[in-house]
């Protein structure tokens, strides 16, 4: 007797969502080399493990919101890096990136890096990335995509912790997901 095949739309949707970052990774990896590829793989795997953990906890709505956050941020990072600069990303982004490169070069040459007071501390973070990967601005943006992705989860958890309902937590995480400058 043949076994009847049934399709669960929810499972198929989840599988398609899981395949989306893999598809994006394969598409972008065709243009990447060396450390770009390794860094991208690490971030994609991290995001996949986080989302798989949430799926096991039956947090499907949060998983969809987090995918939205990831895709939104990734598309904006790709647009900014390879197509045209985004509005309001002009002078500050260039200064932070240049200073990060100067810091990485100073560390490579065993010289004193430039001072990074106040907001320029971010340049040290960029310098650390460049020290290990070379001057690859997209990797720094990609790591920002990952931190923005995690911010959506932390907003959800924070709202739940302070006594908000699950619905309020999902609303807060959705707003955070579609507001990529956070």
Image (cartoon, grey):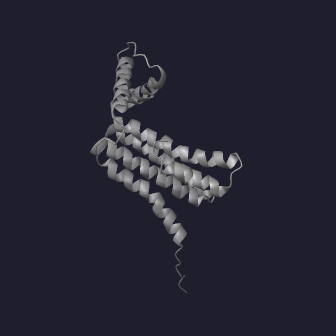
41 left or right, relative to 83:
right
Task: Please say whether residue 42 is visible from this viewpoint.
Answer: no
At horizontal 50% and vertical 68% (from top left) the residue drawn is: 12
Task: Give the image location of residue 111, x and y in percent.
Answer: 37, 12
154 left or right, relative to 83:
right
As displayed, is residue 94 above or below residue 51?
A: above
Q: Residue furthest right?
A: 163
As displayed, is residue 66 above or below residue 90?
A: below
At horizontal 38% and vertical 38% (from top left) the residue drawn is: 139
As displayed, is residue 93 above or below residue 182?
A: above
106 left or right, relative to 166:
left
Task: Please say whether residue 52 is visible from this viewpoint.
Answer: yes
Residue 134, picture quadrant: top left
As displayed, is residue 118 above or below residue 21?
A: above
Task: Give the image location of residue 61, x and y in percent.
Answer: 57, 59
Q: Residue furthest front?
A: 88
Q: Residue furthest top?
A: 111
Residue 112, picture quadrant: top left
Task: Give the image location of residue 45, x and y in percent.
Answer: 48, 47
The mark tally for this picture is 0
At horizontal 37% and vertical 30% (from top left) the residue drawn is: 92
Instruction: Give the position of the N terminus as an image quadrant.
Output: bottom right
Residue 97, picture quadrant: top left
Task: Give the image location of residue 104, x and y in percent.
Answer: 37, 23
């Amino acid at each position: 007797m043949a076994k009847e095949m049934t399709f669960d739309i929810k499972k198929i949707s989840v599988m398609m969502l899981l395949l989306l970052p893999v598809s994006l990774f394969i598409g972008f990896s065709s243009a990447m080399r060396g450390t770009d590829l390794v860094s991208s793989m690490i971030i994609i795997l991290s995001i996949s493990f986080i989302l798989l953990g949430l799926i096991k906890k039956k947090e499907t709505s949060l998983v969809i919101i987090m995918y939205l956050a990831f895709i939104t941020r990734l598309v904006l990072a790709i647009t900014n890096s390879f197509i045209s600069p985004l509005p309001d990303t002009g002078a500050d982004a260039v200064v932070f990136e240049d200073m990060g490169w100067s810091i990485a070069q100073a560390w490579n040459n065993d010289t004193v890096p430039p001072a990074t007071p106040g907001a320029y501390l971010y340049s040290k973070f960029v310098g650390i990335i460049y020290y290990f990967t070379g001057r690859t601005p997209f990797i720094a943006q990609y790591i920002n995509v990952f931190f923005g992705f995690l911010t959506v989860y932390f907003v959800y958890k924070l709202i739940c912790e302070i006594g908000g309902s699950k619905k309020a937590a999902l609303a807060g995480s959705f707003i955070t997901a579609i507001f990529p400058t956070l």
